[in-house]
Amino acid sequence: MNYLNESFKDDIKKYPKYQEMIKQMQKEVDEFASSFHDDPNINSEWGHYYFCNNDGGRLIFDLNKPHSHVCEVCHKEFKSEIYDGVWVYFYRNTAILTAWKAACLYKALADKKYLEITKTILSFYADNYKKIKIHNKERQVFDTYEEMTWGCGRILPQGLNESIICIRMISALEIIKDDLDKEYLDELYFKMFREMFYLLKPQVNQIHNIRCWNNSAIGVMGLFFNDLEMINFAFNGPYNIRRQLREGVTSNHFWYEGSIHYNFFTLEGVINLCLFAKLYNYDFGEELEIVHQMFIEAYHYAFNNGFFPNPNDGWPSINLKTYDYIYQIAMKVFGEDDIVGQILKNILANPLARTTLPLSKPYYYNNEIAFERLLLNSSVDFTKYQVVKQETKNYETSQFGLLRNNEYNLFLKYGLNGPSHAHPDIMNIEIMHKDKMISRDMSNPGYQSKLYKEWFKKTISHNTVCCNGLDQEKRSPGVCLRYDNNHIEAYSENVYPGVNYKREIDIANNVLKDTFVVTSKDEVTSDFAFHLEADIIIENKLDLKKANLGFKENGYEHIIDCHKYVGGLNSLDLNLKQGDYKYKLNIDLKDKELYICKTMDNPVSSTRTSLIIRSKGTNANYQMILEV
């Protein structure tokens, strides 16, 4: 099997969209290459710094403005040494992507200019690799591999980022390898890629998504250069890729960290190694089937409209098309006729728009055609496919369940498999009606954003119960007591010390019933939070009085425009409107207080209406009934 299809050049002539994409890539590559310049004396900074503290919006990377960084939401300009260092991070990512695109253009157009662009960029980083300081995202600098702490890079600020660009470099070389002499490849190997191995090897020290990327980069380098030490480390070392998959993937074929994004992020690294193993006829092992099943299951835990639930760390409003570029690599590995190939065709047939990623961005033409599609599957006719119906499942070892019927999709997260990338929101729910979200998890902005720590990673910002104004403490699994396609009941013990949760949800036709029971040894103030999407309007004229929830931290400081319902009813019907849809939300208020507030959405340029139902005592029974 070849990286590019044998009919690659003919495919471009056959499909007008590919011709347009090639022209756009020419323009981008020519522009960047004409002024390419980097300084090995400058260190890069972590991409997660590049977010606005005012609203969580990403700052705009402008190739021509290395010292000006503007928020995409509020348009405030930021200037600092750290932001300048993140600009270097994006510049170097762009440089490596440009080399990869130039390799593609050379094969598409037979113009040696693009071969030279690829060689020039890669040679620069090879010639200067050891001149760039070993550094990490904490801004520490080290002189030797022996002194460095975990997480270091050279070109970029993390071993993770170094692994990503390493795979892109090798992918570029794979495209043009027949046009490169041994002397040039040896220079790259000894000056840069062997050094990358020395850098990454000591960082592979546990089961984690980043170590999957490290292993994959080492394995891809090893296979390309026939370096048996690298190959053996990646496939048989102490924390090798096979072990990562055996121990890091649950029996439900989901990455243990419990994040949709990190599940795909892990798959992205792993599937690149799968691809190179196939290109070089190397036996990946029986763990390849784990990867295969992960791609299949990922399709089934999406909502009917193609969007994903969003537990734990990740990015907001992601959908299946966000990750179709990873499925493109999987199609190359498993084949067009395999179920994974058919799933990809189903994904692309969905009319929804692709939502993008703010960091580690893949390259797309018009946000429609993935670079990997052009490179790996240029001859595939994506209009001919078999329909793959999404299934309804409970992913018990992954700690979440899905319910579906003709009206609703509901997602419930009832536990965690550890602290990595976890949010304190056990028993959080997300609800979709038809193609509209009623309430979703906002995920988060970049990790260094002030609002990530103060709001997005707080219990009260999720659809669960917060006790005594504190974040939930539990980071371990819950228990599913009962499950079928229309019903789920789950239990979690000691969510806080001595406080237990049980949540039971039924969907029947157009009615969704939600019961949440909190029991505790001591009296607690428990706040049941339910956050409505920003475009949902409450149509009732309610008896409200301006109020204060009392708590001043753990996210409560960001709750605004708070009013208490003083109408006196023990059972309240709220009339909700969202576009053409109308709903009735019945809330049980016996022995409880209802607060209606405004809270931040993601991005915070819009706000959500949030319902907070408060109970005090040792036993609280919350109940909501949603009816279309």
Image (cartoon, rainbow, N blue to C red):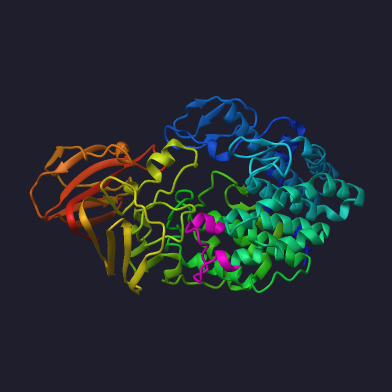
Identity of the residue drawn at 82% across and 38% down: 127
Q: Residue at x 71, y 65 (%)?
A: 235
Give the residue at x 22% y 39%. Answer: 550
Q: Position of residue 71 (x, y in %)?
A: 49, 32
Nearer the observer, 606 or 567 = 567
Q: Is residue 535 visible?
A: yes
Q: Is residue 417 magenta?
A: no
Q: Quadrant of residue 221?
A: bottom right
Decide which of 560, 458 is in the foreground and name it.
Answer: 458
Q: Where does residue 107 sit, x and y in percent of width and height?
A: 80, 52
Left or right of 203? Residue 353 is: left
Whether residue 379 is situated above or below residue 97 in the rendered picture: below
Image quadrant of residue 407? Answer: bottom left
Give the extent of the magenta segment. Answer: 246-264
> Where is residue 44 drawn, in percent x and y?
65, 35
Q: Nearer the viewer, residue 183 or 232?
A: 232
Quadrant (top left/top right/bottom left/bottom right) for the N terminus: bottom right
Answer yes or no: is residue 335 visible.
Answer: no
Q: Position of residue 39 (x, y in %)?
A: 74, 30
Looking at this view, name the residue that lies furthest to the left.
568
Reply above or below: 441 against 548.
below
Residue 247 highlighted magenta (yes or no): yes
Q: Quadrant of the C terminus?
A: bottom left
